[in-house]
Amino acid sequence: MNAKEFLKALDHIVEEKNISREVVLEAMELALATAYKKNFDSKTNVRVDINPDTGEIKVISYLVVVDDYDEGTETTDEEGNIVRIPPEINEDAQILLEDAQEIVPGIKVGETIEREVTPKDFGRVATSTAKQVINQKIREAERSSIIEEFADKEGEMMVGMLAMEDAKNYYVDLGRTRGILPKSEMIPEETVEMGSSIKVYITKVEATTKGPLILLSRKHYGFVRRLFETEIPELADGTIELYAVVREPGIRSKVAVFSTNDKVDPIGACIGERGSRIASILKELNGERVDLVLYSEDPQEFIKNALSPAKDVIVNITDEKNREALAIVNDENLSLAIGKKGSNVKLASRLTKYKIDVKTLAQINEEGNKAE
């Protein structure tokens, strides 16, 4: 491989793998140094320099000037075994000051004596030998680059393509890498097709020995939050703020919002003209119910709103310190306030951070009579 071909190959790797030219050059220099030691010289006091402009490769042998040979030290480990600590400068790379001054008069301790030792056929042998090492370094650099790209995307929503599946997971193509979408993190009863686009919420980004691990979800409450932020422009510009989201995937979500502008109705803005905005969100959630709740700093008002779709709710804070409340409803609204399997009142409690007890006036009177 001549210098021109080398630079062409280098630039191809940089462009294809989207990693820095410097990282690839460093990886190749290390790999070529390993190849030289293996094929031409077992000593370790060599380095390889690659000219980034011309592609010229040089193998440089060097000696570090020392005032006395450092052979390392010996010590004992916790079990009493003798352990040798290598010298700071490799033994092969040391030369005594007096010997060095015979070669280079005036040289000082810490300076180096260098000479080029590039073999004539080094390009052919080194390219073949170093290929595996170079590929490994490039893979490592590519992994780091992907981790860096996705590090700030944890907690964000992305659109990917369903690439493949196994018994437990879907694998979503996110561009330069694939994310893992466990089937347990899908919205219950939803169906998907391979090759179709899919919106996913990134729950975790982690570097592992096997490469970047990117975990995805469609069940996470953050998925609903990001859907609203995508579909509702007023959330993006700050006219409306999203206070909190709680969710029972596949059944119901409650989204508390409020307006920073008295002239803007936060609930209406989220619904959109003829329900267009909320319809897009509901479609993505596979028919999961979404209750839009008007946030209030008054806990009684907030709890009343959170128990939607129940109406005519009267709320009393029974224990402010322990955050307990009693919600009084009529018979017609009792089942709505509680919800199927208690889902509505549970979500309202999580949204408001109050333990909510729902009762009818008749139930309260009956309990009062029993107490007497």
Image (cartoon, rainbow, N blue to C red):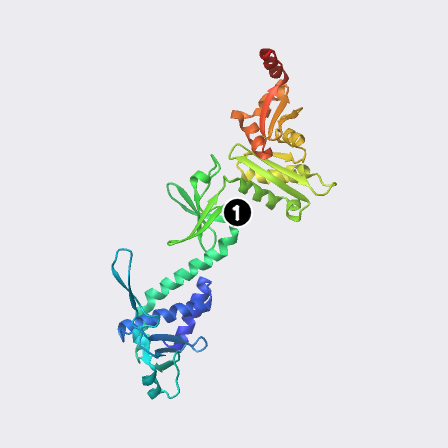
Q: Position of residue 310 (x, y in %)?
A: 62, 26
Circle 1 sits on which residue? Answer: 155
Quadrant of the snapshot with the N terminus = bottom left
Disc 1 marks which amino acid? Gly
102 over 254 or under it: above or below: below
Q: Quadrant of residue 61?
A: bottom left
Q: How many marks?
A: 1
335 or 77, nearer to the observer: 77
Residue at image location 26% in from the left, 55% down from the top: 79
169 or 150, nearer to the observer: 150
Q: Is residue 171 left or right of residue 75?
A: right
Q: Is residue 28 visible?
A: yes
245 over 154 or under it: above or below: above
356 or 245, nearer to the observer: 356
> Dot 1, how many residues are within 10 Å of its Cα: few (below 14), some (14-19), or many (20+)?
some
118 over 319 or under it: above or below: below
Residue at image location 35% in from the left, 70% down from the top: 88
Label 1 secondary element: loop
Quadrant of the snapshot with the C terminus = top right
Q: Position of residue 253 (x, y in %)?
A: 56, 35
Residue at image location 40% in from the left, 63% down from the top: 138
Q: Residue furthest right?
A: 263
Q: Is residue 35 left or right of residue 331?
A: left
96 over 367 or under it: above or below: below
Q: Is residue 125 visible?
A: no
Q: Quadrant of residue 368?
A: top right
Q: Is residue 273 left or right of residue 109?
A: right
Q: Position of residue 371 (x, y in %)?
A: 58, 13
Q: Position of residue 281 (x, y in %)?
A: 58, 40
